[in-house]
Image (tube, coloured by chain):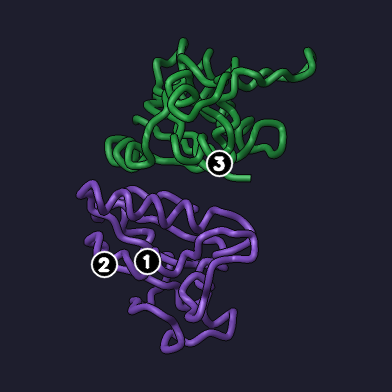
Chain colours: A green, B purple
Amino acid sequence: MKYTLIVYGAPYSSQAAHSALRFARALPGLGHTVATVFFYHDGVYNASTLITPPQDEPHLNQAWADLKTTQGCELLVCVAAALKRGVMNDAEARRHGGEVHNLGEPFELTGVGQLLASAQSSDRTVTFAP
Amino acid sequence: MTDKTLILIRHAPHGTSFAREGIEAALVGGAMGMAVDIVFAGDGVFCLLPDQSAGALGQKGTLPMIKALPMYDIETIFVDRVALQQRGLEVSALAVDVIECELASVTASYRQIVSF
């Protein structure tokens, strides 16, 4: 079955992102795939390329990128939730007069409508909240 | 089982932005012509109380957004009967027209549920 995962939890603040990753990694072994991971609410911080954990802890931003490499899933970030939390790509940073950006490939900024579209085109939608 | 998407609101209107972001998702779905229903359960039923205004933290209130749902073709607004009872609330005291329901029977009939 195709799964959409929704992540509301900020990295390292709660278990949500870790649980979502472990769930996503377990799916192929059971014959399922992750089609989309959608980051909303504080989950948008997972997309920050500036995440720098201690070297002996999981690097969540890199782990999500690896998930896309291995499973080909979309990594979608709600643009409204991200902008107000200071997470944005180069184009948005320039549009809003910022000098830096902290989001890029393989994460994509998108509207929350895409969350509902992803859910409707998947067999299952699972939410990971703090 | 319906192919419509159910938005489940479980958080109070203030304290976190979950309720607000969930209602926003419902409105966006409606604006994009998607088939969306919404249900308020748990502390989410507090979103339906009248006489709310913008919060002290400068956040916009959620009640005007809920009242706008029908304008976005979201006509079905459920509220969990047990959640109301547990909080001493009557459906007649709510600020919007809602359908009282048993949460489990509603969620069981939707293929897709997005929870906030």
Task: Identify the residue position indicated by label 2 in the image.
Answer: B70
Q: Residue at x 41, y 89 (%)?
A: B92
Q: What amino acid type is highlighted by mark number 2? A: Pro
| Relative vertical location of residue A76 with respect to residue A117 in this rendering, above or below | above
* SS at circle 2: helix
Task: Identify the residue position indicated by label 1 in the image.
Answer: B105
The CA span between labels 1 and 3 is 26 Å
| Relative vertical location of residue B79 with respect to residue B33 in this rendering, above or below | below
- Examine the rendering and report whether any part of residue A29 can be seen: no
The CA span between labels 3 and 2 is 27 Å
Residue B88 x/y as whole percent: 58, 85
Seen from the viewer's position, the closer of residues B106 and A62 is A62
Give the label, 1 or 2, closer to the camera.
2
Q: Are marks 1 and 2 on the same chain?
A: yes
Residue A65 x/y as whole percent: 52, 15
The chain letter for the residue carrying disc 3 is A
Q: What amino acid type is highlighted by mark number 1? A: Ser
Q: Are marks 3 and 2 on the same chain?
A: no
